[in-house]
Amino acid sequence: MDIRRMKVWLLGTKADNPLPFDPQHARPDCLCLHAKGEERLSERIASLRSLLPSLPIFLICEPISQAYNIDDFSRAARAAPDGIILRGVESAARIQMAETLLRVVEARENLDEGAIALIAMIGDNGGGLLNARHFLHRHGRLIALGYDGDALDHGDGAIARHGAVATMLAARNLGIPAIDFSATRSPAEAFETSCHQAARTGFAGKLTENPEHIGIIKSAFGTA
């Protein structure tokens, strides 16, 4: 999986048949699904892989700590996605916790160690941004950092802009790309502006939940 060539990240819909996009002319580089609320994750992923065998599938998981969401995170990992996007990563300790949980699941499910990639969303919470300069050690499965300005911007665009820069700097320190998960529901014109801004900042790709925006992302970020 070449993460640097994955520009278009599409948020999946409730139904996969028919597909929400044209696999011949408007194909994303990765399909993302929310793990929360999805009762049959393994069956859903197997179905998608039968329809789109070469398309990576990532699951979006809620923040974890010693007190919450450990079971949900492990259940998502047992579905054997190509990767997990972990929200609310406040510190390097959260990445280490995710690494440990994924190793346990991979061993129990007879998966190769490191089979499930990890994207850490440090740019969707204040703690992650405050600790951005402390993300210094890269685990092998950590392939990118994530940023979501919508989770930061409460009427103050300066905070969101700072979050984008801090996420990019942390990613560069780790030698990995950063993905922009902001503005997924914006109308076309606003989304296009957001795409070009993200590309200028240095992000490698962008998430959308609207298949009609796939062409906008490809135009802003260039072809792989």
Image (cartoon, rainbow, N blue to C red):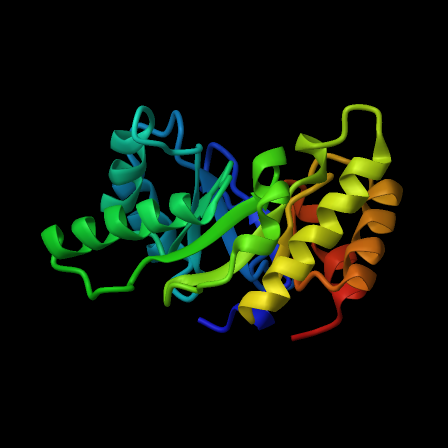
Q: Is residue 70 above or below residue 7?
A: above
The reply to whether residue 140 is in sight is yes
Q: In percent of the image, x 63 and y 34: which residue is there?
A: 126
Q: In percent of the image, x 74 and y 58: which residue is there?
A: 217
Q: Nearer the viewer, residue 117 or 59?
A: 117
Image location of residue 61, percent across then percent down: 42, 37
Q: Describe residue 93's horizontal placement relative to residue 200 as left or right.
A: left
Quarter occupied by the C terminus? bottom right
Quarter occupied by the N terminus? bottom left
Q: Describe residue 89's horizontal placement relative to residue 93 as left or right.
A: right
* Quarter of the view holding residue 162: top right
For the image, the number of numbered tags is 0
Image location of residue 150, percent across then percent down: 71, 33
Image location of residue 26, percent across then percent down: 65, 59
Q: Is residue 199 above or below residue 40?
A: below
Image location of residue 134, percent across then percent down: 54, 54
Q: Describe residue 219's horizontal placement relative to residue 60 as left or right.
A: right
The reply to whether residue 21 is in sight is no
Q: Nearer the viewer, residue 28 or 137?
A: 137
* Quarter of the view holding residue 139: bottom left
Q: Is residue 154 above or below residue 93?
A: above
Q: Is residue 60 above or below residue 143?
A: above
Q: In percent of the image, x 42 and y 66: which residue is there?
A: 54
